[in-house]
Image (cartoon, rainbow, N blue to C red):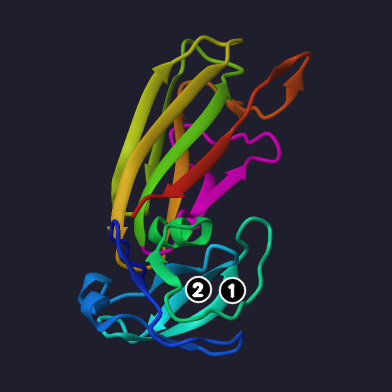
Amino acid sequence: MAEALLNGIASTLVTAIDTAQTTISIASVDASKFPAGANYRIAVTDSINTELMLVTGGQGTATLTVQRAVEPYSGLQASFAFGIGAIVAQVLTQAGFAALIPLSYQQVSLGGNLSPAQSVWTNVLSLTLPAGVWNVRANVTAAPQTGTNPTQDVRIWDGTTVFASQEITCSVGFRCAFSIDAIIGPLATTTTITVQIQFYQGTGQVLSVTTTGTVINCTNFKAVKIG
C-alpha cells in the first residue's frame, strides 16, 4: 500500500503499551486528523525513548494497528513500553521518503566494439522497463572508419514508437558523440526499449567503448523511473 503524509499531525496515547503490543489507542478527538486511506509512519515518544512505527491498519480511527520499531531512531532500533500521555506524531523518515517517491534505476553498457552494416538499423543496447514513467538517456560514440562524411542516426524506440533520435554527419577518423533522452510512458506493461544506430556511406562503422590514453569513449543506456 502506498504511504501518505500530512503535516503537523499529533496525538497522545490513551492507554499504556508494552514492548510487544501491535495496536495502540490515541485520543479519539485526533483520529480524523491522521491519514485515513494509506499506511503512514509515526514516532511515539515519552521524552526519554522514541520508537518509529508503521501504521498498517485502523486508519481514520482511534485504534491503530502498527508494526513496531520499523526503523532506527538516533541509532537505536528497539521497541519500548510507553505510558498514557506519550506523544504520537506522524513523521517523515528515511524509509518513508523512499516509499513516497520510489525510484528505480537501470543502466547497461556496451562491452566491446560493434560494427553494424550500412543502411540498416542495428541494435546497440536494450533495457527492459517495468510499467511506469521513465526518463531514459543514451550516450553513443561512433567512429566512422571509411567513406566520405558518413551520416549516422541514433534512435530510442520500442519496436513501434520512436521516442527520440539524433543525426550527425561525421568525418572519417573522428568520433561522433550522441546524447539523446526521452520521457517514456506511462508504460502499461513491461516494455523493452532499444538504442539503435544506422549509417550511410562507407563500411566498417565502429561504436567504440575502448580506452585510448586517458580518453574514455563510453556507450551506455540508462533509465530512471519517475512515476
| Residue 119 is inside the magenta segment | yes
The answer to which of marks 1 and 2 sits earlier in the sequence is 2
**Residue 75 percent coordinates (x, y):** 68, 57
Q: Please give the label number shown on residue 125.
A: none
Closest to the observer: 39 or 161? 39
Q: Amino acid at mark 1?
A: Ala
Question: Which image quadrant is residue 191 in?
Answer: bottom left
Q: Is residue 96 above or below residue 196?
A: below
- Report the residue at 61% width, 84% height from top: 19
Q: Please give the label number shown on residue 69.
A: 1
Are the residues tagged 1 and 2 within 8 Å (C-beta)? yes
Question: Which image quadrant is residue 205 in?
Answer: top right
Closest to the observer: 122 or 128? 128
Q: Amino acid at mark 2?
A: Met
Question: Which image quadrant is residue 74 in?
Answer: bottom right
- The local secondary structure at tag 1 comes to strand
Give the alpha-carbon distance from disc 1 to disc 2, as whole Å: 5 Å
Q: What stretch of residues is rendered in magenta?
A: 102-131
Question: Which residue corresponds to mark 2?
Answer: 53
**Residue 109 percent coordinates (x, y):** 62, 41
| Residue 72 is inside the magenta segment | no
Question: How many numbered discs, if any?
Answer: 2
